[in-house]
């Protein structure tokens, strides 16, 4: 008997909770079907479609009073657009030089709110702005590639970019601060063959900037390298006419890497090694450093043996 009573009691609790839930859902649906008035802050981004070389800096946000359906209001904060981009045409601009009346752009704002939202009012009634004419500058592209290579492989030549420079349009003070345009970093590891792809111009730290194109094609030529040695003469610079100067050794062994393609083209005459006598006068020892003044562009990772030479000086 007690088991039956417990069953009946549990059933009553279940029925009670069901009706409570149904009533709650009905109440919620009734509330969501109603309309509500919300006040929302928007960033305003003005532009003039007839003169895209001019930017407008709006000094304040706009508060919009909106009549909105309850279902939309529930997800309003998640889906709402925070910035409204408004075309202030020449007719509006002809009225003034540095402000726009809210009444002049009421319809334009209302059209951007979307279905289920009705614009009631906008404040402030006057929106002030400043504008700046844009300038253009032709700047080189920096690929910003992070590369590592497989054993006995190397990059042959510079990274090929198409295009290697682009036009950038911005305020003059922004252009003055830029000497190049960087791409978003990309990493390629353990390369054993040539690779190509697309880089994207990095505009994340630049405001109110437009570029000729945002995607840049690149190619990296990768080849197997050969490591070898060659001997080249050492030239002494700034030797005084009043002194006899001897350096030991007079020839330097150069250990270097070059691609298989370029290896046969490299000669000792392609290298120019020098030692500067002025360094000897500043040195506390009798040794001076060997410098590489010229080398083939295709050569990588040069080591010199020795990289310091001994100097013996006597009067004539």
Image: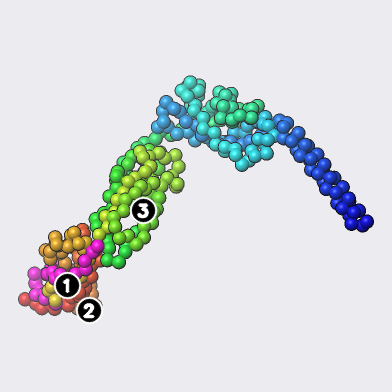
Residue designated by label 2: 285
Magenta residues: mostly which secondary structure? strand
- Relative to the observer, which residue lies in front, 34 or 9? 9
Taking the image as shown, residue 40 lies to the left or right of residue 162, namely: right
Examine the rendered structure and indicate whether residue 198 appears above or below residue 135. Answer: below
Q: Residue at x 70, y 34 (%)?
A: 70
Whole-percent x, y for residue 312 in the image: 13, 78
> Label 2 vs label 3: CA separation?
42 Å
Examine the rendered structure and indicate whether residue 246 appears above or below residue 49. Answer: below
Disc 3 packing (10 Å; few <14; some 14–19; many ≥20): some
Q: Is residue 233 magenta?
A: yes
Residue designated by label 3: 144
Pick out the residue farthest to the right: 1
Helix, strand or loop status at disc 1 = strand
Residue designated by label 1: 253
| Residues in magenta, as a range | 224-248
Whole-percent x, y for residue 295 in the image: 18, 62
Whole-percent x, y for residue 93 in the image: 48, 24
Disc 1 packing (10 Å; few <14; some 14–19; many ≥20): some
Helix, strand or loop status at disc 2 = loop
- Frontmost of labels 2 and 1 is 1
Q: Where on the picture, by quarter, is residue 270?
A: bottom left
Helix, strand or loop status at disc 3 = loop
> Label 1 vs label 3: CA separation?
34 Å
Q: Where on the picture, by quarter, is residue 261?
A: bottom left
Q: Earlier in the sequence, mark 1 or mark 3?
A: 3
Q: Residue at x 64, y 38 (%)?
A: 76
């Amino acid at each position: 008997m007690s088991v039956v009573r417990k069953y009946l009691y549990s059933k009553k609790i279940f029925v009670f909770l069901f009706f409570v839930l149904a009533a709650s859902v009905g109440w919620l649906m009734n509330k969501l079907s109603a309309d509500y008035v919300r006040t929302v802050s928007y960033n305003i981004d003005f532009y003039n479609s007839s003169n895209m070389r001019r930017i407008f800096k709006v000094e304040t946000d706009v508060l919009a009073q909106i009549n909105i359906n309850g279902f939309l209001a529930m997800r309003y904060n998640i889906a709402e657009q925070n910035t409204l981009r408004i075309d202030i045409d020449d007719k509006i601009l002809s009225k003034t030089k540095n402000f726009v009346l809210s009444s002049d752009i009421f319809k334009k704002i209302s059209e951007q709110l979307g279905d289920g939202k009705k614009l009631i009012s906008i404040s402030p009634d006057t929106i002030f702005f400043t504008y700046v004419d844009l300038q253009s500058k032709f700047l080189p592209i920096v690929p910003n590639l992070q590369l590592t290579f497989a054993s006995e492989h190397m990059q042959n030549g510079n990274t090929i970019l198409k295009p290697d420079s682009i036009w950038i349009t911005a305020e003059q003070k922004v252009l003055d601060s830029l000497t190049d345009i960087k791409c978003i970093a990309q990493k390629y590891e353990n390369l054993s063959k040539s690779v190509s792809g697309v880089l994207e111009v990095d505009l994340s730290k630049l405001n109110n900037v437009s570029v000729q194109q945002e995607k840049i094609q690149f190619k990296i030529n990768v080849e197997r390298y050969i490591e070898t040695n060659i001997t080249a003469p050492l030239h002494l610079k700034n030797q005084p006419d009043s002194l006899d100067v001897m350096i030991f050794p007079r020839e330097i062994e150069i250990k270097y890497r070059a691609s298989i393609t370029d290896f046969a083209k490299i000669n000792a005459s392609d290298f120019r090694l020098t030692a500067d006598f002025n360094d000897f006068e500043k040195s506390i020892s009798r040794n001076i450093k060997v410098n590489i003044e010229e080398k083939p562009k295709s050569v990588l990772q040069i080591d010199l043996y020795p990289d310091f030479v001994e100097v013996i000086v006597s009067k004539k």
